[in-house]
Amino acid sequence: MYAIVENGSKQYKAEVGSVIRFEKLDANVGDKVEFKVLLLSDEKGVKVETELNGYKAVGEVVEQGKDKKIVVFKYKAKKNERKKQGHRQPFTAVKILEIGKPKKAKAESTEVAEGGQE
């Protein structure tokens, strides 16, 4: 089973147990993060976003880091214009723990709260 999840304006293919490098997220190592599921594919078939109300992909932040350096070199021929610049893109590595509907823990907590008000 795999899902297509969205973070920011980018989409990623996620499977349970896989580690995905997202653009930098505001989370610490060990935190749990949730992503919106756009498409889900399993042995039953493919479901799209309209059929997936409430589906989430839950992952745990494994690492915060920077990618390898890339060199940006701008050059204008015959003008003696040269500019060399480096860039390291920050990323967050997330291990996908589960994909599916969230558990219905809210219904149980409201029953307990209603019972205590009588």
Image: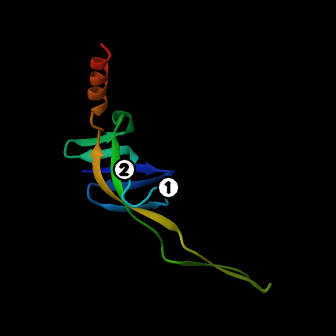
Give the vertical position of 1 relative to 24 (above or below). Answer: above
Name the residue located 53 percent from the left edge and 78 percent from the top edge: 69
* Front: mark 2 or 1: 1
Q: Is tag 2's residue or tag 1's residue first in the polypeptide sequence?
A: 2
Crowd rating for badge 2 (residues with CA inside 10 Å; few <14, some 14–19, many 20+):
some
Most distant residue in the top direction: 118
Q: Quadrant of residue 92?
A: bottom left
- Which residue lies under the disc numbered 2? 4
Crowd rating for badge 1 (residues with CA inside 10 Å; few <14, some 14–19, many 20+):
few
Nearer to me, 30 or 52: 30
Pinpoint residue 108: horizontal percent, then vertical percent. Answer: 26, 28
What coloring was used for the rendering? rainbow
- Quadrant (top left/top right/bottom left/bottom right) for the C terminus: top left
Nearer to me, 2 or 65: 65
Q: Secondary structure at mark 2?
A: strand
Pinpoint residue 76: horizontal percent, then vertical percent. Answer: 74, 80
Nearer to me, 30 or 54: 30
Pinpoint residue 3: horizontal percent, then vertical percent. Answer: 32, 49
- Which residue lies under the disc numbered 1? 26
Name the residue located 51 percent from the left edge and 51 percent from the top edge: 9
Name the residue located 29 percent from the left edge and 19 percent from the top edge: 116
Q: Secondary structure at mark 1?
A: loop
The amino acid sitting under disc 2 is Ile
Nearer to me, 100 or 3: 100
